[in-house]
């Protein structure tokens, strides 16, 4: 899983989910947790199971808050695995310190 290290409140960010399994993936769920609530971002039971989702950082979060994106995947045998990526909310940047994430089509 991959997401940008930092983002501003209200920003949209790319979250990349890559799944691999020797028995085949049957289901993937991606959620966003901002410390107060967990919100579904994307869920799929049909391929492709490796994808990029565009998620929104809540606009009400304060500088320094952490938003965690978590993905869980289940295979044909019922095994479940997962991963996560965290984004730190920033409201100001030092010169040359902030970069906008690139969004792949």
Image: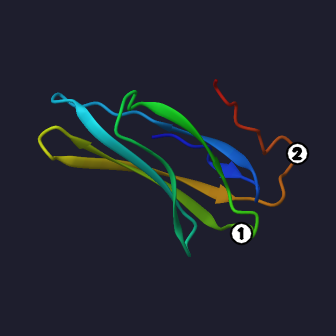
Q: Nearer the viewer, residue 42 or 82?
A: 42
Q: Residue at x 64, y 25 (%)?
A: 104
Q: Quadrant of residue 36?
A: bottom right
Q: Residue 90 shows which numbered tag?
A: none
User: What separation in Å lies between label 2 and label 1 (alpha carbons)?
Assistant: 22 Å
Residue 30 vs residue 56: left or right?
left
The x and y percentages for residue 100 are 76, 38
Residue annotated with mark 1: 61
Give the structural element (helix, strand or loop) at label 2: loop
Q: Quadrant of the C terminus?
A: top right
The x and y percentages for residue 15 are 55, 41
Q: Residue 95 shows which numbered tag?
A: 2
Give the structural element (helix, strand or loop) at label 1: loop
The x and y percentages for residue 52 are 54, 34
Image: 25 above or below 30: above
- Disc with the residue nearer the chain's start (2 vs 1): 1
Image: 62 above or below 74: below
Most distant residue in the front direction: 46
Q: Quadrant of the N terminus?
A: top left
The x and y percentages for residue 37 are 54, 72
Residue 71 vs residue 41: left or right?
left
Most distant residue in the bottom direction: 36
């Amino acid at each position: 899983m991959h997401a940008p290290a930092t983002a501003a409140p209200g920003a949209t960010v790319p979250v990349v989910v890559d799944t691999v399994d020797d028995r085949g993936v049957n289901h993937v769920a991606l959620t966003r947790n901002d410390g107060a609530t967990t919100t579904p971002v994307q869920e799929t039971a049909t391929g492709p199971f490796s994808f990029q989702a565009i998620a929104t950082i809540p606009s009400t979060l304060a500088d320094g808050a952490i938003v965690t994106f978590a993905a869980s995947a289940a295979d044909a045998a019922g095994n479940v695995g997962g991963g996560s990526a965290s984004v730190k909310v920033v409201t100001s940047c030092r010169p040359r310190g902030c970069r906008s994430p690139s969004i792949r089509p």
